[in-house]
Amino acid sequence: MSVYKQFMRLVEAWPKDTSRKKDLGLFLEKRVRRAFSKAEASNVNEKECREMYEALERISNDNALKKYPLEESYRKITVSGLDYEGCHFMNSVKREEEFNKKLSTKLTNVIPSFLRRGHVAKKSS
């Protein structure tokens, strides 16, 4: 099987999270499509591609997690103290939009209305 076809299968199988601005699956898909813009006829370094493919495949298959499994108690806690769902939400676009909305509301309440409209008090001479 060609390197191109291997990469395309890996990209298709890689999970993508559209709720984030930055997602590894989406990033990989863009990079592979750019690198193989001419499909099988693309001029790529075969050895380098195979090494990269094998590394990405190990990540995709959770080889390290299978080799060094974590106890269940460690899987539920992160440095932040959030569980998986909490971490996922904190990195989502939805959370960012909620934060910006709250910030905008707070600024609206703090900044006097005449400054928000661009009016600046004239200095008296």
Image: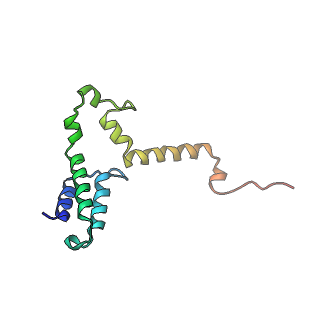
Q: Residue 106: x percent and y percent?
A: 55, 42
**Going 52% across and 44% down the picture, which residue do you hit?**
103
- Does 62 appear above or below 116? above
The quadrant of the image that shows the N terminus is bottom left
Q: Residue 22: x percent and y percent?
A: 36, 52
- Does 65 appear above or below 17? above
**Going 31% across and 62% down the picture, which residue do you hit?**
31
The quarter of the picture where residue 26 lies is: bottom left
Q: Residue furthest top?
A: 73
Q: Which colour assignment does the render follow?
A: rainbow
The quarter of the picture where residue 83 lies is: top left
Residue 18 seen from this side: no
Q: Nearer the viewer, residue 49 or 69?
A: 49
**Going 63% across and 50% down the picture, which residue do you hit?**
113
- Does 14 appear above or below 65? below
Q: Nearer the viewer, residue 19 or 56?
A: 56
The quadrant of the image that shows the C terminus is bottom right
**Going 30% across and 37% down the picture, which residue do you hit?**
85
- Left or right: residue 96 versus residue 72 is right
- Left or right: residue 118 versus residue 14 is right
Q: Residue 98: x percent and y percent?
A: 43, 45
